[in-house]
């Protein structure tokens, strides 16, 4: 088989076809050697089921898909998918992040765990991006997006970083090679804002903040998504360099679950 080109490798999660900018997938087996009384290796035995990981990046062209709603979806919510013709099942989102910066479209980075073997064979599944079912011809961009709820003395926001993560723990029954369930725990929302100040001086218990980042289409005033973080400011940072301005950075952490 000849090498597949970038445009021939489509990522599919549930019913969503994703024309990813970058993507990778891997599967690992947990094995341990079994030795006899003489210390000789007799065989290799599995110590856990298969676990795979898929990561991909793509430009934000609409509202966040439901599989990225880590704070809202039930822990039993799972997806099937494919990558370059290889199928997988029982996939769960573990994290996603994005950055809003001047003069740049917004790119989403996603990570998923799955608990199945890869099926089928590597094959081309080319699709024109404009023909995909979720094509909207809209793009979240730093030129339109804005932040509300920042401390009152931060008058200018230069960039925003937003991330949500969750710990996934597979539960296996005796004699089973696939998990009976995968728990969702340790859900955190983090938002970092860079601007011209750092707000009030940080207290020992942190400072409360409720911040919303409005993601707007670059060609209109249409709101694609609102990203919220209601938690404590846990760090502040000030930097300055020659021929530049003083920049302040605050980091807000929300423990959701």
Image: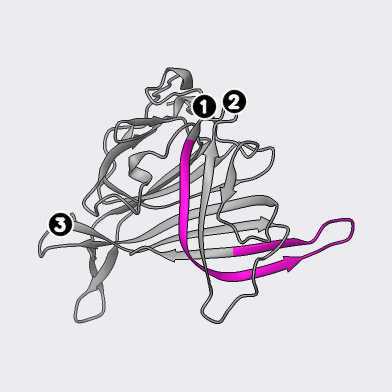
Residue 16's disc is none
Q: Residue at x 76, y 65 (%)?
A: 239
Q: Is residue 227 magenta?
A: yes
The vertical placement of 124 against 208, above or below, is above
In the rendered image, which residue does mark 2 sit on?
Answer: 219
Residues at circles 1 and 2 in contact by the CB criterion of under 8 Å: yes
Q: In this view, does 162 lie above or below 59?
A: below
Magenta segment: 224-250
Percent coordinates x, y for residue 114 in the rendering? 30, 49
Mark closer to the chain start, 1 or 2: 1
Q: From the image, tell me which residue sits under label 3.
A: 180
> Is residue 95 placed above or below 223 in the rendered structure?
below
- Residue 89 in sight: no
The percent position of residue 217, horizontal first and vertical second, equals 55, 31
**Position of residue 77 in the picture relative to residue 241 (left or right):** left
**Disc 3 to disc 2: CB gap under 8 Å:** no
């Amino acid at each position: 088989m000849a090498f597949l080109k970038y445009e021939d490798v489509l990522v599919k999660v549930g019913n969503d076809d994703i024309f990813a900018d970058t993507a990778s997938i891997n599967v690992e087996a947990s094995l341990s050697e079994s030795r006899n009384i003489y210390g000789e290796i007799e065989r290799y035995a599995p110590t856990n089921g298969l676990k795979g990981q898929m990561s991909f990046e793509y430009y934000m062209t609409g509202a966040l898909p439901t599989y990225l709603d880590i704070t809202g979806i039930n822990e039993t919510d799972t997806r099937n998918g494919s990558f370059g013709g290889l199928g997988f099942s029982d996939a769960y989102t573990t994290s996603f992040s994005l950055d809003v910066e001047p003069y740049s479209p917004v790119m989403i980075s996603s990570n998923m765990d799955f608990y199945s073997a890869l099926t089928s064979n590597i094959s081309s599944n080319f699709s024109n991006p404009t023909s995909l079912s979720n094509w909207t011809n809209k793009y979240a961009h730093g030129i339109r997006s804005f932040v509300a709820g920042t401390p009152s003395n931060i008058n200018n926001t230069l960039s925003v970083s937003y991330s949500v993560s969750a710990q996934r723990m597979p539960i296996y029954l005796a004699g089973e090679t696939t998990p009976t369930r995968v728990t969702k725990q340790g859900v955190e929302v983090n938002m970092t804002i860079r601007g011209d100040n750092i707000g009030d001086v940080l207290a020992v218990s942190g400072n409360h903040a409720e911040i919303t980042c409005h993601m707007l289409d670059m060609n209109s005033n249409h709101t694609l998504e609102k990203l919220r973080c209601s938690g404590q400011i846990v760090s502040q940072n000030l930097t300055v360099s020659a021929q530049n301005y003083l920049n302040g950075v605050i980091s807000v952490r929300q423990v959701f679950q």
